[in-house]
Image (cartoon, helix red, strand yellow):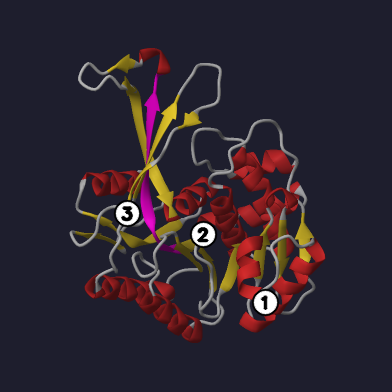
Amino acid sequence: MTLERFQEISAQYSDLRIAIVGDFCLDRYLEIDPARQEISIETGLPVHNVTNVRSQPGAAGTILNNLVALGVGEIYPVGFCGEDGEGYELRRSLLARRGVNLDYFVETDLRRTFTYCKPLVMTPGKAPVELNRLDSKNWTPTPAMLQGRLIDCVGRLAAQVDAMILMDQVDIPETGVVTSKVLEAIGAVVKELPELMILADSRRGLRGYPRVSLKMNAAELAALSGSGTDIDITAIQQSASALAREKDRPVFVTLAERGVVCVSPWTEPTHVPALPVRGEIDIVGAGDSVTANLTAAIASGATLREASEIAMAASSIVIHQLGTTGTASVPQIAELLE
C-alpha cells in the first residue's frame, strides 16, 4: 500500500453513506485518583474517589467513532437506547459527532441503555489500570414491537447507503438489535440489493447469518468450520476460502499479532501481516477499527488486500492508545504508511 494509493482511496470517504445496524452502548470511564483514596467510616472499606467522568459511544458505537475519525460523510446508526440517563448521554455523545444522523436510532422505555462502566486508576506517569467493570445489559428478549421498528429502519435505509455494517455485541441471543427477525430482514436486503457491501461481526459467532461478508477471529472461524483454533496460516486460508465460496461473499479473519487473512470467492486468499508493536498496548477496540476501515475502504473502491493493509495500519494506531477505546484518523494512517 503506497501513500498515494491510500490518499486516492481515502479521498472518497467524505462522499460515503454507511449504516451501522447493531448494539450501541455507552462507554463510561470513571477516572480514579489513587492519591485521594479514603477509608469509609461506615464500612471500613477503601473509597475510590472519582475525579473525572468521560463517556463515549461503545460496542457498535466504537465502529461509528472510527468512521467519524475517517471523515465518512454520513453515518446512520440503527439501534436503540433506553429512556434513562445513560440513554441521554449516549444520544448526546452520538449527536456530537460529525456526520451522524439519528433518524433511525430508537429511544424506548422497553429497554435499558447498554452500558460499560469502566473504573480507571490514573497514576501520573503510568498507564491507566482498569478495575472490575460495571455493566448494564438487557437480559430478556427484545420486544417484537421494537424489532419491528428496527426492521423498518433497515428496509428504509438499505437503498440509501453505500455500505452496511452488522455488529452483534450481546451475550445472550435475541436480547439485542441483531435478532433472528432482523437477520431475516437483512437477508431480504441482500436479495434485493446484491451489490450492497454488508459486513457482519458477532461476538457469539456468525453461524446462520445471511449471505453477507463476514469478519471473525480464528476461534470463530474454527467454530464455523469445525477446525482447531491452533492452526497455521495456510490452514486458516483454506478454511476461509471454503467459507467465502459457501457464502459467495468475502471473508476476513483477524489473527491478532499475526495480522489478517482476506479472501473472496473469486480470488486466492491473502495474508496481510500486522505492524510491529511500538511499546505498551491496549487491544480494546482494535477489531472495531478493522471493521470500520475494511468497510470504508472497500466501499471506496479498494481491493480486499488494500483494505486489509489499511485496516492493519489503523488497528496498530488504536492498540497504542491506552485507557480508552481508540480510533485512527486518515492523517494518522497516512503518517504510518509513509
Q: Which label is found at residue 15?
A: 2
**Circle 1 or circle 3, nearest the eye:** 3
Q: Against 85, is 290 above or below?
A: below
Question: Residue at 66% across / 75% down in the picture?
Answer: 225
Q: From the viewer's side, name the closer residue of 250 and 169.
A: 169
Q: Position of residue 278 (x, y in %)?
A: 71, 33
Label 2 – label 1 distance at C-alpha: 29 Å
Q: Within the image, what quadrant is residue 316 found in?
A: top right
Question: Residue at 40% across / 19% down in the picture?
Answer: 33
Q: Which residues are magenta?
A: 19-33
Q: Is residue 26 magenta?
A: yes
Under mark 3, the amino acid is Lys
| Residue that carries the numbered disc 1 in the rendered image | 244
Q: From the viewer's side, name the closer residue of 168 and 18.
A: 168
Q: Position of residue 296 (x, y in %)?
A: 57, 59
Q: Position of residue 216 (x, y in %)?
A: 60, 63
Q: Which label is found at residue 137?
A: 3
Q: Main secondary structure of the magenta part?
A: strand
Q: Position of residue 183 (x, y in %)?
A: 43, 77
**Circle 2 or circle 3, nearest the eye:** 3
